[in-house]
Image (cartoon, coloured by chain):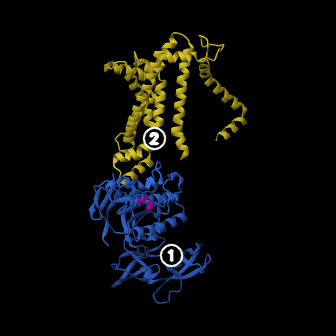
Chain colours: A blue, B yellow
Amino acid sequence: MSPMVEIKGISKSYGKTVALSEIDLTIAEGQFFALVGPSGSGKTTLLHILGGFIEPSAGRVLIAGQDVSSQPPARRPTTSMFQDYALFPHMSVGANVGFGLLMRKVPRTQRLSRVAAALEMVGLSGMNARRIHQLSGGQQQRVALARALVVEPKVLLLDEPLGALDLNLRRQMQQELLHIQKKVGTTFVHVTHDQEEAMSIADVIAVMNNGHLEDVGPPARVYIKPKTRFSATFMGESNMFEGTVAGRSGESIEVDTAFGRLKVPGVAEPGARVSLSIRPEQIMAADGDTPGQVPLGVLQVDEVSFFGTHHRCLGRHVKSNLPMIIRLPQHQAVGIGEKLNIAVQREDIVLLTQ
Amino acid sequence: MLKNFLQTMFNNIPAAVYVALIYFFIFLPVAVLVLFSFQDSLLPIPPFQGPSLRWYQAIFADFRIMEALWNSLMVGVVSAALSCFLGFLAAYGLARYPVRGSGAIQWLLVAPLSVSYLIIGMGLLITFKTLAIPKSLSAVIIGHVVINLPLAFAIIYSQMGEHHANLERAGRDLGAAEWQVLVLITLPLLWPALMASFFLSFTLSWDEFIIALLVSRFDVTLPVEIWSLLRSGLNPKTNAIGSMVFIVSIFLVIITEIAVFGRRKSK
């Protein structure tokens, strides 16, 4: 796939505060791309730079091979779906959706049919004449989506558009966004602070923190094999522990840790201090004597809560007193104070060198 | 809301009496003024005789009063329109662009609100004299812009918050040029605020006496004309004019209420 958006060395600072530092990122055509990170990580700033609302301090933005760095929002082949929807309250639904076409001087008859088609796509057929304040939050959301897509932008920018919805509606809209994106094939760049949302809808995720990119990749890779400590903890719960590299053999290393000497996939120099991470759901209550499994010793359970899909147990590793979180399957209930033998698949231990 | 208000009021009889007395004394002079404008005899004093419309007939036949009325309307409309236009420009600039010393500029723009009309009038008189601007209706218009611009600016500026800025951004994002954003988004959204400032400015100009007296000469506004009528003694004719002025003011206040608060309720 050819690159649709190329971000080259983009930096932005406000006085002495650095909002973005030297971001390089390529987004392929037709991709659903999610920028995820905590608030203040610079994800919204980056999105606004793509839309042309913020001028970067340095760097260039290319869209479909064209340098748009110096173009105002009106001239860019992008449209935005704003956090508060920014629907025009003094216009009808139809006039809102048709606004972009009117600005592009599309003839009236063509405009009306395209507005009708866009409203149908978002499931609001026949709502042309409604006023904005007569619509529910979810409906306003759809109008905003139709308004941004009807002008057939090359890239649609979504600025936390699902933030104001309740959980059920949110999940439903995520599905719909995904569905519509696959149908129209437009490149979507979606900003969110909800890592579950990012994983469930995006083809590629970029994790941002403190104005730089921590990790970029498909959701499964970013979740299962995170590149950095930050992305391991931000993308979900994680058991993080330190170790010293004892030896190296080809594509794997031996690390001395609180759990004993572990052989993990990865490359590092002997003697180096490294971090290892294991996702709570990858730790199982087992002796670890089957091939491929690594025994981790004994865990004493301190707290248990039931989450429907799993039991979340907080406990301590008996030998090292290291706090741990593990998730046990529904049918494997444990009591507080119980001691469990725990183990993990060797390939699920992730080496973090950054 | 009104029902609750009435309930609490009648639960508390002394408070109700107190409120009734306040309104009685506030509206007594106006009621007396309006009542005696229908007086059938030569003096607007009790006993009331009539009702009669003879004094209304007299003012409509009075060339000078009609001219003053027309002057007042003209000064009101022109000064209110100018105040809104200048107030809008100032508000737009300060709300949408980073301006150095914007706090000080805003303070300076609103400061005339705290100065008495008499001081402003004297200041204008001296300034006009220095600049060799003759006393005229145009001078009155300038004076009324001085007192109404701060008000228009404050009302319009208060309505130009981040939410409106975001809507303008959405317009630009969809391909609107700056003038299209202004005409299709900014102005329609500000319409209630513009209407409110216009009618409020008009009402204040319509009533204003001191500045109009100080900076006008041959052509005068209605309040100045009424004042010169009063100097020759009480006359039901002045009551009739006063009633007219009062009715126009009330009418404008109602329009302003509907333009601003009516819209807000429908949201």
Badge 1 is on which residue?
A280
Kind of residue indicated by mark 2: Trp
Assign the magenta stretch its main secondary structure.
Answer: helix
* Residue positioned 40% across, 53% down in the render: A99
Whether residue A114 is situated above or below residue A277 in the rendered picture: above
Q: Position of residue A20 (x, y in %)?
A: 34, 59
Q: Nearer the viewer, residue B131 or A260?
A: B131
Which portion, as a residue range, is magenta? A113-117
What secondary structure is marked by label 1? helix
Whether residue B226 is situated above or below residue A133 in the rendered picture: above
- Can residue B204 be seen by looking at this rendering? yes
- Can residue B160 be seen by looking at this rendering? no
Does residue A115 belong to the magenta stretch?
yes
Other-residue count near label 2 (Cα within 10 Å), few / some / many at <14 / 14–19 / ≥20: some
* Residue positioned 30% across, 71% down in the render: A2
Q: Position of residue B114 (x, y in %)?
A: 46, 29
Badge 2 is on which residue?
B191
What secondary structure is marked by label 2? helix
Separation of disc 1 and disc 2 at Cα? 58 Å
Other-residue count near label 1 (Cα within 10 Å), few / some / many at <14 / 14–19 / ≥20: many
